Image: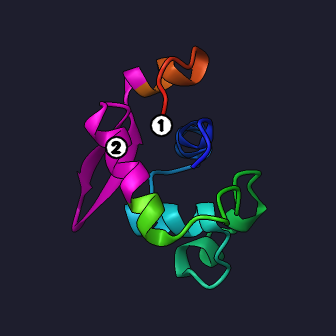
Amino acid sequence: MAHSDYLQVLSAVEQLPFNLGRTALIALLQGKHSHETILRHRLDRMDVFGVLAAYTEEELHGLIGRLQANGLLRAERKQFYHVLALTERGREELRQPRLHD
């Protein structure tokens, strides 16, 4: 993965009109039109749609896990499911990138 790819993930989470779960976020990053949430909310119109299409689902799962481990993303429980949210540290990283993937 390229060094800046983690910033693409953080940017996508920041730009979303609402928080997504890991599976939907990966579908957005990969540019999957077939995902129900992407279709229903027209997320395919976002600039970040498909921005990491070259990566596998497993690679993106790993990247998101590393972002959580580094405190840049956190999982939040919303009713019956978990969604990913940007932490304050994640916002700071977007403003002034310091980490390497």
Q: What is the basis of the colouring in this image?
A: rainbow
Q: Taking 93 as reference, is 12 above or below it?
A: below
SS class, disc 2: helix
Q: Taking 53 as reference, is 5 above or below it?
A: above
For marks 1 and 2, give the CA distance. 8 Å
Q: In which quarter of the view is residue 38 placed?
A: bottom right
> Residue 22's x, y, as percent?
39, 61
Which residue is at 30% across, 30% downward? 71
Whether the magenta-drawn stretch holds residue 68 is answered as: yes
Q: In which quarter of the view is residue 43 placed?
A: bottom right
Indicate the amino acid at tag 2. Answer: Arg
- Numbered circles on residues, count: 2
Q: Would you call the spot at circle 2 few (<14 residues within 10 Å), some (14-19), or many (20 or more)?
A: some
Which residue is at 31% across, 41% downward? 68
Q: Is residue 21 something one can see in this rendering?
A: no
SS class, disc 1: loop
Whether the magenta-drawn stretch holds residue 69 is answered as: yes
> Residue 49's x, y, as percent?
70, 60
The answer to whether the residues at label 1 and label 2 have Cβ atoms under 8 Å apart is yes
Viewer-nearest residue: 86 or 98: 98
12 horizontally vs 78: left or right? right
Residue occupied by mark 2: 66
> Residue 44's x, y, as percent?
72, 67
Indicate the amino acid at tag 1. Answer: Asp
Q: Return the disc, 1 or 2, that comes first in the chain's sequence.
A: 2
User: Where does the magenta region start and end?
Assistant: 62-89
Residue found farthest to the bottom: 34
> Residue 51's x, y, as percent?
70, 56
Which residue is at 23% across, 62% downward? 79
Viewer-nearest residue: 3 or 76: 3
Which residue is at 56% across, 80% downward? 35
Residue occupied by mark 1: 101
